[in-house]
Image: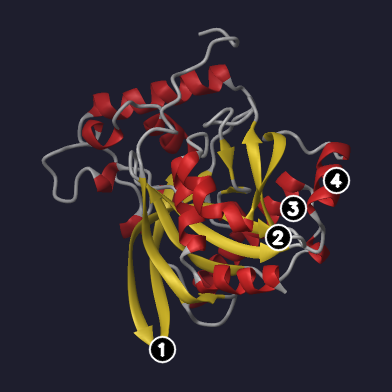
Amino acid sequence: MGSNETLPDNFGKGGWKICFKIEPPATLGNGMLKISFHSDYNRKPHPDDIVEETIKDMWKRRKEVNPKMWNALKFRVDSYSTFHAQGASVVKLNLGLTDYASYQGSGSLASPLTFFQSPEEGAPERHLPLSLGNAGIVLTSDNFIILLERSEQVGEGVGRWVLPGGHPEPSHVNIPDSYLTQSYEGTRDMCLTIERELYNSILMEITEEVGLRSSELFTLQLLGMVQRERDKRPVLVGHTRTTLSKSEMEARFCCQRIHTEACRILFCDIRQVETFFQENEQIMPEHRGALQLYFESSVCQQDWKLCKE
């Protein structure tokens, strides 16, 4: 396959669902998000070798189209549970590991859920990468939500609109590649470090993709998690505000050389967010879900009050 060829875009098809909401939103260290990290939650290879070889082949084809991509460990959401404590939502995430090659390879399939079916208990989910992504709702000082148009240098969703986001990285918390194939159980300290990475990674994606500095951002709040239905990819949704206005953000984005993953910055007036995400099919489905989650949250109500003041 030549470098000027493209693979079919399957990523904008299908719907999304809200997995859970965190009310009030979680902040780092407030005990509303708990992590369990165990090898039992790793992606399990499919019993049919042809299936696994197909995934490897699809990854190879994606790398031929976009040679800048590389493989790396990713966190995998095996399952989650929610409960209430002292009037607040508490979420437990059961995390294991997968890798980017499995995520991109399986995502290139027309129907991952059908492809990964097997007689084994828990199929097809146990064979799906379920790579944990993230997305950040960022509000400007004059109450516009920041979106980005994906460039041709990204692994998926070229030309589609997304919130700033990506993946939390196991490498940032010194998790070795060997954990993908060997048994392990995360210690309490490791789980706390992973929790910190889930928050920090959203802020890092915002600063890298939009060009904001950390000093220009308010405290990050976690609103919950959404899921893309076609491959069940989970995405944690965070919320923050910036001290910059829409016009200042446009100038910052245009002047800085930060356009690796995004070729254009877009804005949605908070007063039009419900109509915006319902009518714009160019938005990736999981990011439409993130906007819906935000619209239903208490944080959105607070932002509305600030908007009216």
Front of the two marks 3 and 4? 4
> Which residue is identified by label 2?
143
Q: CA distance from mark 3 to mark 2?
A: 18 Å
Q: Is residue 37 visible?
A: no
Judging depth in this view, the residue of 102 and 148 nearest the camera is: 148
**Label of residue 233 in the image:** none
Disc 3: CA contacts within 10 A as few (<14), some (14-19) or many (>=20): some
Which residue corresponds to the image point at 54% horizontal and 56% vertical from the top-left? 175
User: Which mark is first along the chain, 1 or 3?
Assistant: 1
User: Residue 13, how many percent across, how many down?
Assistant: 39, 33
Question: Looking at the picture, does residue 139 appear above or below residue 110?
Answer: below
Q: Secondary structure at mark 2?
A: loop
Q: CA distance from mark 3 to mark 1?
A: 33 Å
User: Which mark is first along the chain, 2 or 4?
Assistant: 2
Q: CA distance from mark 1 to mark 4?
A: 41 Å
Residue 259 occupies quadrant: top right
Q: Residue furthest left?
A: 119
Front of the two marks 3 and 2? 2
**Label of residue 207 in the image:** 3
Disc 1: CA contacts within 10 A as few (<14), some (14-19) or many (>=20): few
Q: What amino acid type should be assigned to the residue bearing mark 2?
A: Asn
Residue 53 occupies quadrant: top left
> Which residue is identified by label 4?
252
Q: CA distance from mark 3 to mark 4?
A: 12 Å
> Which residue is identified by label 1?
87
Q: Is residue 189 left or right of residue 246?
A: left
User: Residue 231, how many percent across, how many down?
Assistant: 34, 40
Q: What amino acid type should be assigned to the residue bearing mark 3?
A: Thr
User: Which mark is first along the chain, 2 or 3?
Assistant: 2
Which residue corresponds to the image point at 56% horizontal and 33% vertical from the top-left? 160
Q: Secondary structure at mark 1?
A: loop
